[in-house]
Image (spheres, rainbow, N blue to C red):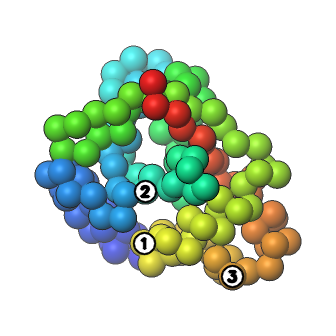
Amino acid sequence: MVTLDRITRQLMIWLTKAGISVLDSRILAVRGRKSGEWRTTPVNLLTLDGTRYLVAPRGQTQWVRNMRVVGGGELRLGNKAEAFTATEVPDEEKPAILREYLRRWAWEVGYFFGDVKADSPQEEIERIAPGFPVFRITAE
């Protein structure tokens, strides 16, 4: 799975940098919390009921730690960059977001969620919610 993840990430980075969004893929750019330098990673932008979210399927990553400190960043697609602010979503609001995220992208990142699927019982989604940071993003 690690090799497949690495290949998928590289493909998504290449396509997104070329300006091709695969199911709302973007390059997330966030300033480092210590260095202040831009750090980038591919993400899947989720729009649910008109609100946009970033979900961290790999859990407490560096981009999550940076986002918590700097409170925003840029979503890049090709040569376009959209600045945004981010607000972390509390655990009790995550289940519907995580369920939709899994429905759309389980083929790409589902193995990070173990045996929890989009159609898993509500209790299972609630159980895993604390391990998956979610940010509500708003364009600046």
Mark nearer the N terminus (1 vs 3): 1
Rounded to the nearest whole Å, what is the CA distance between mark 1 and mark 2? 10 Å
Rounded to the nearest whole Å, what is the CA distance between mark 2 and mark 3? 20 Å
Q: Name the image quarter holding the N terminus.
A: bottom left
Rounded to the nearest whole Å, what is the CA distance between mark 1 and mark 3? 17 Å
Secondary structure under tag 2 reads: strand
* Residue 26: x %, y % from top left: 34, 49
Mark 3 packing: few (<14 Cα in 10 Å), some, or many (20+)?
few
93 with respect to 10 (left or right): right
Q: Amino acid at mark 1?
A: Glu
The answer to whether residue 116 is above or below residue 18 is below
State the residue at coordinates (27%, 68%). Answer: 7
The answer to whether residue 118 is above or below residue 24 is below
Looking at the image, which is closer to me, 8 or 121? 121
The answer to whether residue 43 is above or below residue 119 is above
Q: To which residue does mark 1 refer?
A: 108
Secondary structure under tag 1 reads: helix
State the residue at coordinates (33%, 27%). Answer: 38
Q: Quadrant of residue 57?
A: bottom right
Q: For residue 119, which numbered disc appears in the image?
A: 3
Q: To which residue does mark 2 refer?
A: 44
Mark 1 packing: few (<14 Cα in 10 Å), some, or many (20+)?
some
Looking at the image, which is closer to me, 35 or 118? 118
* Disc 1 and disc 2 in contact, CB within 8 angstroms: yes
Depth-wise, is mark 1 or mark 3 nearer the camera? 3
* Residue 60: x %, y % from top left: 60, 46
State the residue at coordinates (28%, 33%). Answer: 81
Mark 2 packing: few (<14 Cα in 10 Å), some, or many (20+)?
many
Looking at the image, which is closer to me, 123 or 39? 123
State the residue at coordinates (47%, 70%). Answer: 105
* Residue 127: x %, y % from top left: 81, 64
